[in-house]
Image (spheres, grey):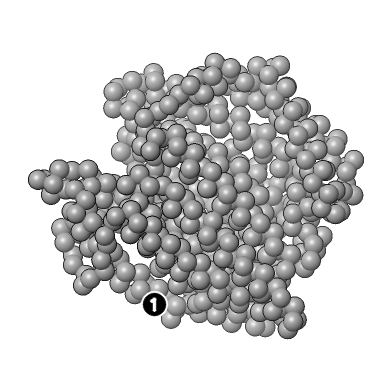
């Protein structure tokens, strides 16, 4: 399978998953609103997903997949080949199953303490704390199930079979949508929002079962034979454990920041955590596509330049990546900031999601997208360290910005509430990027050139012109964003099409588009290894 076909498969299924995830959140917002049950479910969904990213993405993406791939590619006379790789994977699976079972059991027993640490304020609302604990225990088995899914996905990726691993997030969202619809009808009959929350929480764990069954079938179909047997701590399993520890620590800094944001959000008025998660869905749409694409593409290409001591090529590649990142994120940030009320009203307001909730969510979106370019530029700057086998520096920088984030939250959240929390996230993300760039420049690994600065300045001009047009258009269709389906579609389409046309025409006129670079990217067919895919929500 060619690289282009692999990237197309992964990208298409990832986009499909994002669309289903967006639809899932829209349905949940309308049937559950932003009240007691919604907050309790959001916390119950945050817990397994955060640990999933810690274990599945931190451990398997960095440690297991490279070891399995090397064993698979090695000569059988040197202890490699398919049989040896399958034995190694079976040994890891046999140990990992028990680790996950043990961790999940301990976490479920200690769930009241965990929820108290993250959301102690829920105790002030009758029944909210108890519901959050019960729902969290219901959803937590998803962690073990999806971690095994991540392992099987990595195995299939090593065999150049990328579609199953890219499809499982779609399966997750389909099962959750089914749970939301089922909960809606059951809750409508009983008049209880908690019935809906219970149905969706059960659907989370059910989706883990569905994903694991599907991946087990896909693995068997691919001819990979894995067995769960008595755990054995072989030499390779012990080596994997030593690799997992720093990988988990590195991923843990980011996950701790997610818990910090959850802690502050749950300390605010009811519905704050729910509104933050929905607002972040809008922020994640451009971030997921642009950030993942750039992060995946730049690392192997940058590593080749560095290994061949081509410093000029490395500088040029990073400059091109920064230019592309800004070209895509600057107008997206401006458009989302100005049009947030329209998007939120059209997609989320309705049913039990009130217009007051929508106004707050729109303000959160504005605060979050202020850091959108920074969220993506992190994916550009970090590979400059990773490609030089420096994994510690980005972790220490992330840890430092986490401390700053906590301090800023303490200062702004009591005064500005959930919007202040979102603004603090954007500020510390920008600080993270600025620190990464400063160290890169001091080490001579990358620097801004006059040409790059000029190009970004012109992109800012084009974004500003587009922003002015959108600012003028927004009031003209104010009554349409919350109208019927036809009115919503044509009003949002008018905003999007107008914004894109104005931006690209202005960018062309002021020279913000590098025509030579775009032509080069269209011709490029890099022989880079595609990174493994892990399930996302």
Q: Is residue 215 above or below residue 388?
A: below
Left or right of residue 293, residue 330 in this image: right
**Identity of the residue drawn at 61% across and 42% down:** 286
Viewer-proximal residue among 398 and 377:
377
For disc 1, the marked residue is 106
Residue at image position (15%, 58%) is: 235
For residue 312, side relative to residue 67 (left or right): right
Left/right of residue 531 with respect to residue 281 in the rendered view? left
Q: Residue 355: x percent and y percent?
A: 82, 60
Q: Position of residue 374 (x, y in %)?
A: 56, 39
The crowding category of the residue bearing disc 1, from other C-alpha atoms within 10 Å (few below 14, some 14 to 19, many at least 20), is few
Q: Is residue 405 above or below residue 316?
A: below
Q: Considering only vertical position in the picture, is 48 above or below 325? A: below
| Residue 487 visible (yes or no) | yes
Query: Could you say which quadrant of the image residue 98 lies in?
Result: bottom left
What residue lies at 73% left-to-right and 22% top-to-bottom?
Answer: 506
């Amino acid at each position: 399978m060619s690289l282009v076909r692999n990237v197309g498969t992964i990208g298409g299924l990832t986009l499909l998953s994002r669309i289903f995830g967006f639809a899932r959140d829209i349905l949940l917002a309308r049937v559950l609103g932003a009240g007691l049950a919604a907050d309790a479910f959001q916390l119950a969904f945050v817990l397994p997903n955060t640990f999933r990213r810690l274990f599945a993405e931190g451990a398997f993406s960095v440690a297991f997949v490279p070891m399995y791939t090397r064993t698979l590619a090695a000569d059988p006379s040197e202890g490699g080949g398919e049989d040896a790789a399958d034995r190694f994977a079976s040994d890891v699976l046999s140990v990992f199953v028990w680790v996950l079972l043990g961790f999940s059991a301990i976490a479920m027993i200690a769930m009241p303490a965990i929820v108290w640490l993250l959301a102690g304020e829920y105790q002030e609302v009758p029944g909210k704390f108890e519901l959050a604990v019960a729902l969290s225990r219901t959803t937590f088995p998803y962690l073990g199930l999806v971690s095994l899914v991540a392992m099987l996905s990595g195995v299939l990726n090593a065999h150049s079979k990328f579609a199953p691993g890219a499809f499982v997030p779609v399966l997750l969202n389909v099962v959750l949508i089914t749970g939301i619809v089922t909960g809606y009808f059951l809750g409508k009959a009983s008049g209880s929002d908690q019935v809906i929350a219970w149905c969706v929480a059960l659907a989370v764990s059910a989706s883990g079962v569905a994903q694991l069954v599907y991946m087990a079938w896909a693995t068997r179909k691919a001819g990979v034979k894995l067995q769960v047997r008595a755990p054995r701590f072989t030499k390779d399993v012990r080596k994997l454990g030593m690799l997992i520890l720093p990988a988990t620590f590195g991923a843990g800094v980011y996950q701790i920041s997610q818990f910090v944001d959850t802690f502050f959000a749950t300390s605010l008025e009811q519905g704050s955590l729910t509104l933050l998660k929905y607002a972040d869905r809008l922020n994640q749409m451009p971030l997921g596509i642009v950030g993942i694409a750039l992060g995946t593409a730049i690392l192997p290409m940058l590593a080749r330049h560095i290994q061949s001591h081509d410093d000029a090529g490395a500088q040029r590649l990073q400059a091109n990546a920064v230019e592309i990142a800004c070209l895509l994120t600057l107008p997206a940030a401006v458009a989302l900031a100005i049009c947030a009320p329209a998007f939120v009203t059209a997609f989320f307001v309705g049913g039990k999601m009130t217009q007051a909730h929508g106004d707050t969510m729109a303000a959160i979106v504005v605060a979050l997208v202020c850091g959108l370019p920074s969220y993506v530029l992190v994916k550009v700057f970090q590979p400059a360290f990773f490609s030089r086998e420096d994994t510690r520096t980005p972790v220490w920088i992330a840890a430092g910005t986490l401390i700053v984030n906590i301090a800023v939250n303490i200062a702004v959240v009591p005064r500005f509430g959930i919007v202040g929390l979102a603004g603090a996230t954007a500020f510390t993300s920008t600080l993270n990027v600025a620190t990464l760039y400063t160290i890169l420049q001091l080490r001579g690994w990358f620097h801004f050139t006059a040409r790059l600065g000029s190009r970004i300045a012109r992109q800012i001009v084009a974004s500003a012109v587009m922003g002015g047009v959108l600012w003028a258009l927004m009031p003209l269709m104010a009554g349409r964003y919350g109208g019927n389906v036809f009115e919503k579609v044509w009003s949002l389409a008018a905003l999007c099409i107008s914004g894109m046309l104005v931006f690209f025409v202005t960018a062309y006129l002021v020279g913000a588009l590098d025509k030579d670079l775009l032509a080069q990217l269209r011709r490029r067919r890099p022989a880079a290894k595609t990174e493994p895919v892990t399930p996302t929500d």
